[in-house]
């Protein structure tokens, strides 16, 4: 029986590392039209399907006061018709040909994608090129999508304890940088955005020179390039993209904000400024996040939820950004406990990492989780296309994908200790606390 288990374990290990090797062998073809449009293709003829992503390097980071939320608003506006394909035709035609579409907006970019049968590639290219060249921007569409976005804001931010707490945290942590405002935008700005604002925004940021197309799946790169040239080649590069100045001063003291809201129990978020995606420290921070909050055996979850029994939930959020961003930890309280008590426990645990480090076992477990998550994200055409586009947009180099797992493998216990000491300090901390109040107050 033991021999059988050893054989099974060896087989699993072989399959894992075989998958790992496959995930790193990405034969991505890179081409560019004379007008600046970048095209990245990755062939996988396993099934007759494709994913087509378009990344525009524009997000809430590129906005300004009075038009916050316009990037996310355009995520909705882009589905409202153009010249060759009129209002509501995009999704109808796509779905009638076996495809699906979606989009999302981040701080630093906006991404659109379609999953579809590979023999419909030319149709997809035509659909996307049409809306880039001839998007219908009228008062009716603006009014309609404005209300949709406002309702989304009410649902995910105004009526969400965690959403509102996150908004308050970022607004306090960032004083000068556009990360100060939420991706969804301030409600007053959403109301104030005009058609003229939309036209100017679209002309500035939605151009071939500010876009990257990624195609993954059953695709012939040479044929795809010819089709893209056919539908996009005549478009002009667009204007020079306005530079975003990172004027955020170094934080030199803890900041605190309280938010009173109808809620059952208190909660808090503690955020720490961290470097941009260009820093080598991001890989150690990935590992630290896993050790602190990933799963029920993580340090903070185990201590706050199980041992101290003062919290119902503990999690953290941290994602790569073009400019220095934020790593924050959320703690939702149990009855009869206050946030001051939980904060002390949280900071004590962080001090242990800073002073004593983490164990080799914790480090290896975190590496395993990160490797497994990376491989899982590469299993589908959509997952691979999204990662390729993200790395090209944030890092300016999609080939870094091939180095991610080596970066994790090279990390030591000392590396994790150093990033904790460097970024998780009192003076670099911002805390947002949710204070429950009764309805009507």
Image (tube, rainbow, N blue to C red):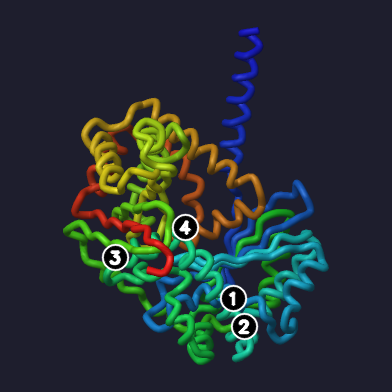
Packing grade of label 1 (10 A; few <14, some 14-19, many >=20) is few
| Sooner in the amino-acid sequence: mark 2 or mark 3 | 2
Mark 2–mark 3 Cα distance, whole angstroms, equals: 32 Å
Give the mark nearest the N terminus, 4 or 3. 3
Residue under the image location 28 percent in, 72 percent down: 176
Gap in Å between the C-alphas at discs 1 and 4?
A: 35 Å
| Residue 313 appears in view | yes
Which is nearer the N-term, disc 1 or disc 4? Answer: 1
How busy is the neighbourhood of tag 4: few (under 14 within 10 Å), some, or many (20 plus)? few
| Rendered residue at 34%/58% (across/down) | 435
Q: Quadrant of residue 415?
A: top left
Q: Relative to 146, does residue 248 appear above or below in the rendering? A: above
Q: Which residue is mark 1?
A: 148
- Residue at (61%, 36%) from the top-left corner? 19
Dot 1 lies on which element? helix
Residue at mark 2: 144
Q: Which residue is mark 3?
A: 172
Q: Pick the residue in front: 227 or 217.
A: 217
Marks 2,1: beta carbons within 8 A: yes
Residue 119: where, in percent of width, then height?
81, 62
**What distance separates the C-alpha of mark 2 from that of mark 4?**
38 Å
Residue 259 pos. (x, y %): 33, 63
């Amino acid at each position: 029986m033991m021999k059988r288990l050893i054989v099974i374990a060896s087989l699993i290990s072989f399959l894992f590392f075989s998958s790992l090797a496959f995930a790193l062998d990405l034969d991505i073809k890179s081409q560019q039209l004379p007008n600046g449009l970048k095209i990245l293709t990755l062939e996988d003829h396993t099934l007759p399907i494709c994913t087509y992503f378009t990344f525009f390097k524009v997000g809430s980071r590129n906005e300004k006061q009075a038009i916050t939320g316009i990037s996310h608003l355009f995520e909705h506006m882009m589905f409202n018709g153009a010249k060759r394909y009129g209002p509501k035709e995009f999704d109808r035609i796509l779905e009638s040909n076996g495809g699906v579409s979606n989009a999302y907006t981040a701080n630093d970019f906006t991404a659109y994608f379609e999953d579809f049968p590979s023999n419909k590639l030319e149709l997809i290219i035509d659909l996307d090129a049409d809306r880039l060249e001839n998007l219908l921007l009228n008062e009716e569409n603006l009014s309609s999508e404005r209300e949709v976005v406002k309702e989304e804001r009410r649902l995910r931010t105004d009526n969400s304890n965690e959403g509102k707490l996150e908004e308050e945290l970022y607004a306090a942590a960032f004083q000068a940088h556009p990360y100060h405002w939420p991706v969804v935008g301030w409600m007053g700005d959403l109301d104030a955005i005009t058609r003229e604002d939309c036209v100017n925004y679209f002309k500035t940021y939605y151009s071939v020179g500010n876009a990257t197309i990624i195609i993954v799946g059953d695709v012939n790169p040479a044929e795809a390039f010819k089709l893209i040239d056919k539908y996009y080649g005549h478009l002009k590069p667009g204007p020079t993209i306005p530079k975003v100045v990172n004027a955020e001063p170094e934080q030199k003291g803890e900041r605190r904000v309280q938010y009173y809201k109808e809620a059952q129990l208190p909660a808090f978020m503690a955020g720490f400024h961290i470097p941009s995606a260009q820093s080598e420290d991001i890989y150690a921070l990935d590992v630290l996040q896993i050790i602190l909050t990933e799963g029920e055996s993580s340090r903070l979850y185990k201590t706050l939820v199980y041992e101290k029994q003062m919290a119902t939930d503990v999690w953290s959020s941290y994602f790569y950004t073009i400019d220095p961003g934020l790593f924050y930890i959320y703690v939702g309280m149990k009855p009869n406990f206050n946030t001051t008590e939980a904060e002390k426990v949280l900071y004590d645990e962080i001090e242990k990492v800073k002073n004593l480090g983490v164990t080799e076992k914790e480090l290896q477990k975190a590496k395993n989780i990160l490797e497994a998550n990376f491989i899982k994200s590469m299993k589908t055409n959509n997952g691979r296309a999204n990662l390729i586009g993200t790395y090209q947009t944030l890092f300016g180099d999609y080939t870094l994908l091939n180095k991610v797992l080596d970066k994790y493998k090279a990390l030591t216990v000392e590396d994790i200790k150093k990033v904790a000491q460097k970024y998780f300090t009192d003076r670099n901390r911002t805390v947002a606390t949710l204070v429950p109040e009764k309805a009507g107050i």
